[in-house]
Amino acid sequence: QEQLVQSGPEVRKPGASVKVSCKASGYTFTDYYMHWVRQAPGQGLEWMGIINSGGSSTHYAQQFQGRVTMTRDTSTATVYMELSSLRSDDTAFYYCAREGGFDLNLWGQGTLVTVS
Amino acid sequence: EIVLTQSPGTLSLSPGERATLSCRASQSVSSSHLAWYQQRPGQAPKLLIYGASSRATGIPDRFSGSGSGTDFTLTIGRLEPEDFAVYYCQQYGRSLTFGGGTKVEIK
């Protein structure tokens, strides 16, 4: 079945970087754009950005520009999100999600990143 | 950036009742660009409605979406125990934004 499986929880100190992975299976990886969305504990959803199907183009939300990098490896059907200069308010669940046109129709299980 | 405002923040209802959730946009949104998600505690969001009114695969027909322009609505016909959750609207124009969410809780 179609699924996105993300890497495990991470703990980082302020100022460090973190790289979260998201492995796709059950569908043609190169047919779909991928997004990243984060959710601070007890808060709402915040869109971070998108990477196109081939990995050649990205678009990041303004509040993350300069700190986030999204990449993808078609050989392993994996997308990555790296966030640098971490602060305590970056503590959140980070989700990858597949774009279905103008919506996100398949989500990873989430990766908790704790900055402390 | 288009801002989505959801109301109410919390909706307290009993199983079997009807739920009506609102999503208002700061500027007009194409209906095809409006989606709704359900998020249960400890789970990732799940797509319910896309294109403002089309149910995603496997979504029961008690869920329906409507609206256009700046005002959109998600209706849950008769609440089942598993429907008590948080619901988010989302638009995707030049960038993607979410509303702040409506929590549907058991009264």
Image (cartoon, coloured by chain):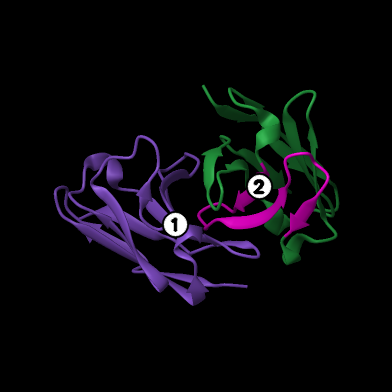
Chain colours: A green, B purple
Range of magenta residues: A33-60
Crowding at mark 2 (Cα within 10 Å: few <14, some 14-19, many 20+): many
Residue B48 x/y as whole percent: 39, 46
Badge 2 vs badge 1, beta-carbon distance below 8 Å: no
Q: According to the image, label 2 marks what residue? A: A35
Q: Amino acid at mark 1?
A: Tyr
Residue type indicated by callout 2: His
Dot 2: element: strand
Q: Residue at horizontal 47%, vertical 58%?
A: B32
Question: What residue is rendered at 72% in x and 27% in y?
Answer: A77
B85 relative position to A52: left or right = left
Up/down of A26 relative to B24, above or below: above
Foreground of the two, A55 or B6: A55
- Residue A7 in view of the camera: no
Occupied quadrant, residue B22: bottom left
Residue at x 25% of width, y 44% of height: B61
Asked whether A1 or A15 is in front, the reply is A1
Chain letter belonging to callout 1: B
In the drawing, does residue A34 fall left or right of residue B12?
A: right
Above or below, A9 relative to A95: above
Task: Let me know if residue B95 is in the magenta part.
Answer: no
User: Which label belongs to residue B1?
Assistant: none
Q: How far is mark 2 from mark 1, CA to CA?
A: 17 Å
Q: Is residue A20 above or below residue A91?
A: above
A19 sits to left or right of B84: right
Queried whether the magenta region covers residue A37, the answer comes back as yes
**Number of marks present in the image shown:** 2
Q: Which residue is mark 1?
A: B88
Q: Tag 1's secondary structure? A: strand
Q: Indicate the position of residue A44 as horizontal and vertical percent values.
A: 52, 58
Which residue, as the protein is rendered here, is positioned at the far left?
Answer: B16
Q: Give coordinates of residue A37: x percent, y percent.
A: 62, 50
